[in-house]
Image (cartoon, coloured by chain):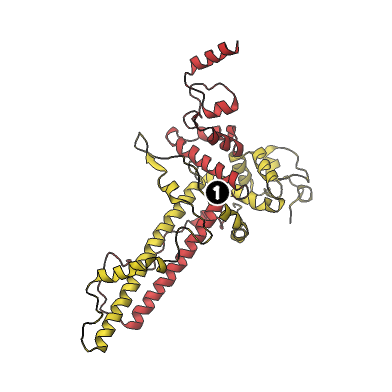
Amino acid sequence: MQLAHKRMASSTHPSAPCAACKFLRRKCIQGCVFSPYFPPEDPLKFTNVHKIFGASNVSKLLNEIAPHRREDAVNSLAYEAEARLKDPVYGCVGAISVLQRQVLRLQKELDATNADLIRFSSNQNMLTIPQSPGNYPQNPHALPPNYGNYSWNCNP
Amino acid sequence: MTLKCAAANQACAACKYQRKRCTPECALAPHFRPEHPVLFRNAHKLFGVRNILRILERINPNHKEEAMRSIIYEANMRDHFPVHGCLNVICDLQSQIRQTEEELYNVLTWLAFCKQHYEGQHVITVSHGVDHGMLQSDNEAVALFRQDSTTLLPVSSCDNANVCIHASWLQDTYKLSNSGRKSLVSRPLIIEEEAIHDHHDEIYPLFDNTEAA
C-alpha cells in the first residue's frame, strides 16, 4: 500500500523530491518553490536554512522575489544560516565587523602615506618629478566610498 | 537598564505585533521597544519568534544582547536588500578593501620612486655631476620598490588575527547563468571561526544603537 502510494507520488513528480520536501516529509509537487534551489544532493543547505529561518519564512521571502533572482536570494540565505550556526552570537555580522575595521585601518594607512608623500615633496622642493600617469592617483585624497548608513556601527 | 513591559505599562513591539499580553517575563521585551515596531517586524519576517528564541537559548546569557543586535541588523539588511541581505554589505566592503589597497600600493610606489629620484639627484649634486646612483628609468625605481613591496604594505586582506573572509568564495561565486545573468553559486562558507570568536570583545565597542528611527 505504501509502495503504491510512493509510486503514485513519483508519477506526478518523476524526479526525486527536493531536499526541502524530503526534510519536511511531504510530497514534492511540480512547482514546489524550493525544488529549483534545494537539490536533493545537498540536504545540508536546506537543513541549515530551515534551522535558522524556517521553511515558512523562506517560502514567503522567495514568493516576494522575482523568479530570476531567487537563486541568489537562497544562496545568500544559506550563507547567513551557515554563518549563524557557526557563530550563534554574531552570525555573518561578525565578518562585516572585521571587514569594516580593515577598511578603516587601510584608509588611515592611506591618509598617512599621502601625508608622507606631500610632506616629502614639499620638503625636497621636488618640482621636476617626472609624471608617471599610470602610477600616481589623480586625487591622492580620494577615498573609496563609505558604505554610509548601513555600516555595522551606525544606525541602519 | 532593562525595559520591563509592566513597568512601562506598554506592550513591547514583539507582543504588540503578535497581539498578546506582554508579561514581565517576556524574553523579547528588552530588545524590541514599542517605539520601534519596524525592527521586530523585520526580525519576525526573517527569523520568526520561535527561531529567535531558539538562538537565544543556545548562547551564553551575557551575549544575548549582542546576539539580538546582530539579529536585528541582519533582519534590517534583508529588508533593505531582499535578495542579498548582508552579503551586499560584505561584497561592498571587500570591494572597498581591494580599492584602498590598490590606491595605497600606488601611493607607496610613487613615494618610493620620489625618494629614489631624490637620492639620485642628491648624489649627483655631491659628486659634481658624476652619474653615480642615478636611476636610468622609472621602471628601475618601481622594480626596486616591488622587491620590498611586501614589507611596505603591512596590511593585507588577512589581518594579524588570521581572519580571512576568503575573497575567492565571493569573487568566484558570481557566474553567468544560462540566461546570461550573474548569479550566486553556493559554495562552502570559509570563515576563520577562531578569529571571529576571539574578536567578540573587540566587536562589542563597535556596536552602536541599531534601532531605526
What residue lies at 46% left-to-right and 55% top-to-bottom?
B93
Mark 1, other Cα within 10 Å: few <14 / some 14–19 / many ≥20: many
Q: Is residue A25 above or below residue B135?
A: above
Give the labeled residue for mark 1. A92
Position of residue B201 relative to residue A8, above or below, is below
Q: Secondary structure at mark 1?
A: loop
Q: Nearer the viewer, residue A74 or A66?
A: A74
Q: Colour of chain B?
A: yellow
- Locate the N terminus of chain A by quadrant: top right
Q: Is residue A126 visible?
A: no
Residue B119 in the image: state x and y as whole percent: 30, 81
Vertical position of residue A122 compared to residue A7: above or below: below
Q: Residue A84: where, in percent of width, then height?
A: 59, 45
The chain letter corresponding to red is: A
Residue A75 x %, y %: 48, 39
- Residue B23 lies left or right of residue B135; in this view the side is right
- For image coordinates 44% across by 46% down, the residue present is B169
Residue A34 vertical position relative to residue A139 in the rendered view, above or below: above
User: In the drawing, does residue A138 fall left or right of residue B54?
Assistant: left
